[in-house]
Image (spheres, grey):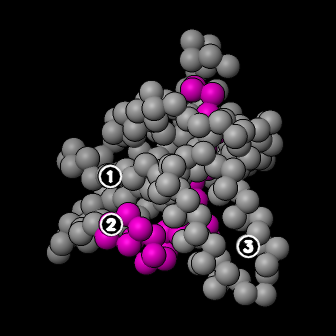
Amino acid sequence: MTTTTLTLLDALKQRRAVRNYLPQEVEEEKIAALLEAATLAPNDRLREPWHFYVVRGEAKQRYEQLARTYLEERFPTKPHLVKESIKVLETTPLAIVVTADIIEGDEASSKDNEYAAACAIHSMWLTAETLGLGLVWRTRGIGLVHDERMFAFIGSPEGKKIIGTLFIGYPQGEAPATARKPYAEKTTWL
């Protein structure tokens, strides 16, 4: 679908977690469009509390090794799981690590910053759809969000918390639709 015929509700309905990509690099113009969309996300007090670490080329190879070591340690009795997870990373042309600012002594604002970074990720996800790209937001496992090695990999930035690692590329086939409950089942009118 093109951007001229894609409504916002259509984009939300079509958004998928894409995990399989074609072996094709993502153009810098499209990476820039994703990052621009991210910076337009809502955020408390206009703090713009996010930072993006674009991982490709040699850095992506280092990330693959880091992920392999992590997964082998975490799942020593599941080599098949490690192999399949690494295969996904190896075939992903682009990763972007997203962080949120931590405000020393202000836990509530720090939490608000995490929400803002999540909104930035969602803006990127919807933009990816309009650019013909697929995206999946990884946290646990291969996303390494909860592992100190990822923090070291991005340079141990002071005052930052990793919110997610995004895998991005040109989809290899259609990602299946997922069933969603009607909003009425998740809504209480007061």
Magenta residues span: 130-156
Is residue 149 or residue 38 the one in the foreground? Answer: 149
Residue 46 is drawn in which quadrant? top left
Dot 1 and dot 3 residues touching (CB under 8 Å) = no
Residue 82: x and y in percent read 73, 73
Residue 92: x and y in percent read 64, 49
* Mark 2 vs mark 1: in front: 2
Residue that numbered label 2 is attached to: 155
Left or right of 70? Residue 160 is: left
Residue drawn 63% across and 28% down?
Answer: 132
Q: Is residue 147 magenta?
A: yes
Residue 157: x and y in percent read 28, 66
Residue 137 is drawn in which quadrant? bottom right
Find the distance from the CA under tag 1 to the CA under tag 3: 29 Å
Question: Of the residues shown, which amino acid type is indicated by label 3?
Answer: Val
Question: Of the residues shown, which amino acid type is indicated by label 1?
Answer: His
* Label annotation for residue 51: 1
Residue drawn 76% across and 38% down?
Answer: 172
